[in-house]
Image: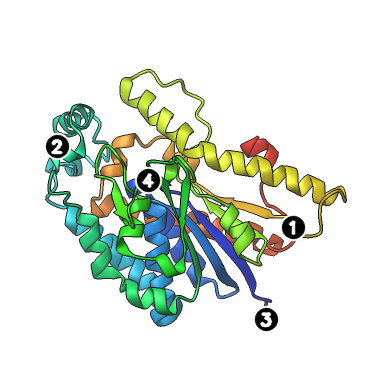
Amino acid sequence: MGTTSKTVNLALQGGGAHGAFTWGVLDRLLDDERMSFEGICATSAGAMNAAVMAYGLTIGGREAAKHSLAEFWRRISEAAAWGPLQPSPFDRLVRTRALEKSPVFMFFEMMTRLLSPYQFNPLNYNPLRDVLEETVDFERLRRNNVIKLFLCATNVRTGKVKIFHNDELTVSAVLASGCLPLLFQAIEIDGEAYWDGGYMGNPAIFPLIYGCQSTDVIVIHINPIVRQALPRTASDILNRINEISFNSSLMREMRAIAFANKLVSGGAAHDQIKTMLIHAIEADSLMKDLGVASKYNADWEFLTHLRDIGRTCAEEWLAANFCHLGMRSTIDIHARYL
């Protein structure tokens, strides 16, 4: 017996190498032909996943999208293989993925507090640019894109969120979405400077509300919202500050969605306001145990470990929640975000 196809939107968070978890989720969702994708709003590593997936869908459908994602993350690992922030042979021997105690990482972290990227990287070299250009033909993506992309960045001068749409997709737009200001010089596009989109939208949801017909939004979470343990070390405190700040814009939007949904259900809303159905795929039990240093860990074993967890989480989510798409939210918005 056939199953009616359901169209959804995706919202992809950023989080460095932890974006390999999202790779796994997308890989599994692409296997399910009962589901189609209208729009993707994404930030940072999520924006890279989104652009690569969209390009694969554009040039060859689902299998090409899966292949493009795998190639992208393989190239990320290869580009970082000889970098100073990867696990040492001893780390691999004892199967640890932590870098927090690495003298090289501690020195690197200290230097980013003392020197700006305009000082320690005056040539503005970014290996991600080469990886993206090797993976995605952006001219072809702009011309033939089969999915609506909304990539979030933060305008440095105005402090406002910038959404790059399909006709604005370039390698610089993707890099702008993931430009961490302590690591990279601001990305300049058409006279404006941009930093990581996580500060103003990780990711933004409003483009999916106004730009798409589907009311289902699946948020793929990377940054834990709740942590029970009180951070006490300097690195743990900074990590928690980043998590809170990078989740804050999403939580604000979810409050607005919850309010609008309440108005609609109570009959008090304007006819043009629609009920949004929110879903979430996450692995908070894993992510809360990963330190901030692991976001720089592009070791292939670590990336595929996160990918496999992402696939498993997506498999479990589909089994439990596919039938609810188009019918209701599968998370309690109030309990999770308010």
Q: CA distance from mark 4 to mark 1?
A: 30 Å
Q: Quadrant of the C terminus?
A: top right
For image coordinates 69% across by 38% down, the residue present is: 334
Disc on the earlier residue, 3 or 1? 3
Mark 4, residue position: 196
Query: Pointer 4 and pointer 2: residues touching (CB < 8 Å)?
Result: no
Does dot 3 land on a helix, a strand or a loop?
A: loop
In front: 204, or 243? Answer: 204
Residue highlighted by disc 2: 119
Per the image, the residue denoted by label 3 is: 2
Q: Residue furthest front?
A: 191
Badge 1 density bin: few <14, some 14–19, many ≥20, Cα 10 Å: some
Q: Position of residue 105 (x, y in %)?
A: 19, 34
Could you tell me which residue is drawn at 76 percent across and 60 percent down?
272
* Amino acid type, residue under disc 3 in the picture: Gly
Residue wearing tag 1: 274
How far is the residue under mark 3 from the one under mark 2? Answer: 60 Å
Q: Using a 10 Å C-alpha cutoff, classify the residue at mark 4 as few (fewer than 14 neighbours), some (14 to 19) or many (20 or more).
A: many
